[in-house]
Amino acid sequence: MQLLKKKNSNARSPTLQTVLMVEKFIDENSGEYKKTELFKKLPRKVMWQTFQIIMGYLESIHKIAYDNKDYVVYIWNPEFYEKIKNSPEIKI
């Protein structure tokens, strides 16, 4: 996240509560909004620069992706993780 912050020095570091709020909103509305629409629909106001940091972070840890029409899609699958985490073929 430090790397993302350096790109935009005017942005504030997001709190964990804000990151979780954005992640939950994306999970509940996966594939319904493009990035700017999603920003405007969030349950609480967030600065655009802070939102950008959160989105970059969620993308970097493979929790979100963008479809071919630029809609934000939540791709993290905890049930699948639980199934594979103890598999000898997987190194976590």
Image (cartoon, grey):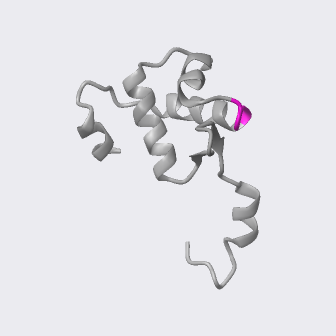
Residue at image x 65%, y 44%?
Answer: 74
| Count of numbered badges drawn on the protein | 0
Which quadrant does the N terminus fall into? Answer: top left
Residue at image x 68%, y 76%?
Answer: 86
Image position of 60 with respect to 40: above or below: below
- Residue 24 coordinates in the image, percent (x, y): 65, 34
Residue 44 in the figure: left or right of residue 12: right
Q: Main secondary structure of the magenta part?
A: loop
Residue at image x 54%, y 30%?
Answer: 35
Image position of 75 with respect to 13: above or below: below
Please identify the residue farthest to the bottom as the structure is shown: 88
Residue 79 in the figure: left or right of residue 61: right
Which quadrant does the C terminus fall into? Answer: bottom right
**Does the stretch in magenta take in 67?**
no
Q: Nearer the viewer, residue 35 or 12?
A: 35
- Residue 59 coordinates in the image, percent (x, y): 50, 47
The quadrant where residue 29 appears: top right
Residue at image x 56%, y 77%?
Answer: 91
Residue 2 in the figure: left or right of residue 19: left
- Residue 68 coordinates in the image, percent (x, y): 62, 45
**Image: magenta residue range:** 28-32
- Residue 66 coordinates in the image, percent (x, y): 58, 44
